[in-house]
Image (cartoon, rainbow, N blue to C red):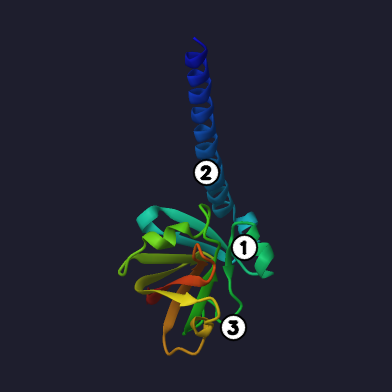
Amino acid sequence: MLKKLFKLILLISIITSFTLYINEDIDYNKNVDNIIESKIKMKDYDGYLYIPKFSYKGLIKSGKDKEVLDSNNILHFNNGCNLNDEYGNIVLAGHNNKYVFSILYKLSIGDDLIVYENSKEYKFKIYKIITVNIEDTYILNNVVSNKMITLITCTKDNQNRLVVIGEFVSP
């Protein structure tokens, strides 16, 4: 009898914690959608990244690196390139967690990335996925002859970075 009671309590606690985990994700996603829908709140952000393959939306923000990243936002890396520039490398960085860039590992060459800024849509197609050493900064370079986007996140060992690069296909 005691074993059955223990198993029942264990099962209930597992189900409860799983439900809380799912609700946390739903609340986070709902919050992102509410911010995107609210033009007033969007003024605090540079825009948002949409990855159609996963229906993922992440808020993009400029600012102090650690502050932006730790608030589960995508950091628009200040390398001198903006979305409305004719050419350059737009670099977006994010933590490798369930709210930001853990999905980058599931992307493939040919997948779409869409960035929305001030009601404008910028579409990119992934053409390169690489891993670089944490010390390699050449991927942040803004000297390119076309418009491109670079998404960057840490790997599990924190010694390398996963880099996803897309080329601009349409405004």
- Is 78 placed left or right of 21 in the picture? right
Give the camera-side residue of 71 and 162: 162
Sequence-wise, the earlier of marks 2 and 1 is: 2
| Residue pointed to by mark 1 | 69
Which quadrant of the view contains residue 166?
Answer: bottom left
What is the distance, in whole Å, between disc 1 and disc 3 at their CAs?
19 Å
Label 2 sits on residue = 25
Front one among 95 and 88: 95
Residue at figure coordinates x 47%, y 58% from the top left: 102
Residue 28 vertical position relative to residue 97 in the rendered view, above or below: above
For the question of whether residue 106 can be seen, the reply is yes
Classed neighbour count for the residue bearing mark 2: other residues with Cα under 10 Å, few (<14), some (14–19), many (≥20): few
Residue displayed at 52% across by 60% down:
96
Q: Residues within 10 Å of mark 3 (few under 14, many from 20)?
A: few
Horizontal relation, residue 106 to residue 3: left or right: left
Q: Earlier in the sequence, mark 1 or mark 3?
A: 1
Side of 78 where 56 appears, left or right? left
User: Could you tell me the amino acid type at mark 1?
Assistant: Leu
In space, the residues marked 2 and 1 are separated at their CA atoms by 18 Å
Q: Amino acid at mark 3?
A: Gly
Residue 80 marker: 3
Tag 2–tag 3 contact (CB < 8 Å): no
SS for dot 3: loop
